[in-house]
């Protein structure tokens, strides 16, 4: 693939590593200056993002990844086990592959696993998960809604939540950033 063909979400092998394209934009050059493609890439091994510039005519190695839905069932040491809900096949995925998102993986969670030649490269979690508040300060009902307090979730992660949230409430948390989105709706309501 040419650098000018880079698209968000595509995966490439570059300098011996696998990268996911987070963002790509082309800029035309003027006069003797050639154009350039700016790309923000996520290293799928280290989970660090980097920014690179490519010439539009530069050849890059695009990688076709297999995508399949898997359901998380349990963790054992540094391995997180996912099951294919159709075949019941189990797949161990190293904690390093999940990165910081491993804090939001819980039994029953469905995720898309992207793999290359049978090796998991990346796990795409849902945009948000529902978790229960295990402990937090007593709720206060103040007029100012932008005030936040610390809360510990049932997965052990600490997040900032609005003052009205109480222990036992279910909240929606954004998996990419780990930030509070909203109080979860009551089941059946």
Image (cartoon, rainbow, N blue to C red):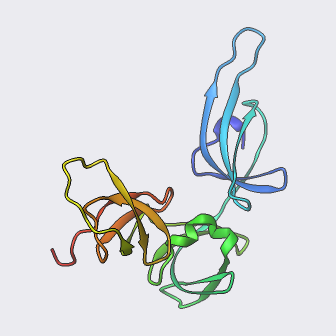
Q: Residue at x 78, y 40 (%)?
A: 59
The answer to whether residue 108 of the structure is visible from this angle is: yes
Q: Residue furthest right?
A: 16
Whether residue 132 can be seen here? no
* Residue at left offset 47%, top offset 84%: 107
Instruction: Give the vertical position of 88 relative to 44 (above or below).
Output: below
**Quadrant (top left, top right, bottom left, bottom right) of the C terminus:** bottom left
Query: Which residue is at a point 62% across and 51% down the rendered structure image?
Result: 10
When the figure is inspected, residue 119 is found, relative to residue 147, above or below; the finding is below
The spot of residue 150 in percent (x, y) is 41, 62
Could you tell me residue 26's position as x and y percent? 63, 29
142 or 158, which lies in front?
A: 142
Q: Nearer the viewer, residue 23 or 6?
A: 23
> Residue at position x 69%, y 70% from top?
96
In this image, 127 relative to 17: left or right? left
Q: In which quadrant is the N terminus drawn?
A: top right
Q: Position of residue 80 (x, y in %)?
A: 61, 81
Q: Position of residue 60 (x, y in %)?
A: 77, 44
Q: Quadrant of residue 116?
A: bottom right
Which is nearer the eye, 91 or 143?
143
Q: Which of the 4 image quadrants contains residue 186?
A: bottom left
Relative horizontal placement of residue 83, taking residue 50 as reference (left or right): left
């Amino acid at each position: 693939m040419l650098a000018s063909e880079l698209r968000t979400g595509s995966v490439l092998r570059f300098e011996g590593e696998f990268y996911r394209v987070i963002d790509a934009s082309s800029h035309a050059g003027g006069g003797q200056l050639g154009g350039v493609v700016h790309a923000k890439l996520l290293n799928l091994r280290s989970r660090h993002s980097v920014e690179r510039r490519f010439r539009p005519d530069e050849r890059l190695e695009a990688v076709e990844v297999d995508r399949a839905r898997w359901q998380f069932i349990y963790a054992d040491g540094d391995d997180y086990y996912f099951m294919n809900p159709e075949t019941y096949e189990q797949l161990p995925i190293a904690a390093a592959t999940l990165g910081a998102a491993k804090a939001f993986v819980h039994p029953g969670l469905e995720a898309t696993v992207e793999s290359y030649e049978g090796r998991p490269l990346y796990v795409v979690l849902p945009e948000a998960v529902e978790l229960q508040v295990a402990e937090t300060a007593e709720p206060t009902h103040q007029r100012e809604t932008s005030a936040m307090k610390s809360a510990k979730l049932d997965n052990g992660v600490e997040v900032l939540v609005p003052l009205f949230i109480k222990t036992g409430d279910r909240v929606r948390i954004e998996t990419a950033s780990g930030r509070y989105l909203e109080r979860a709706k009551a089941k059946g309501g």
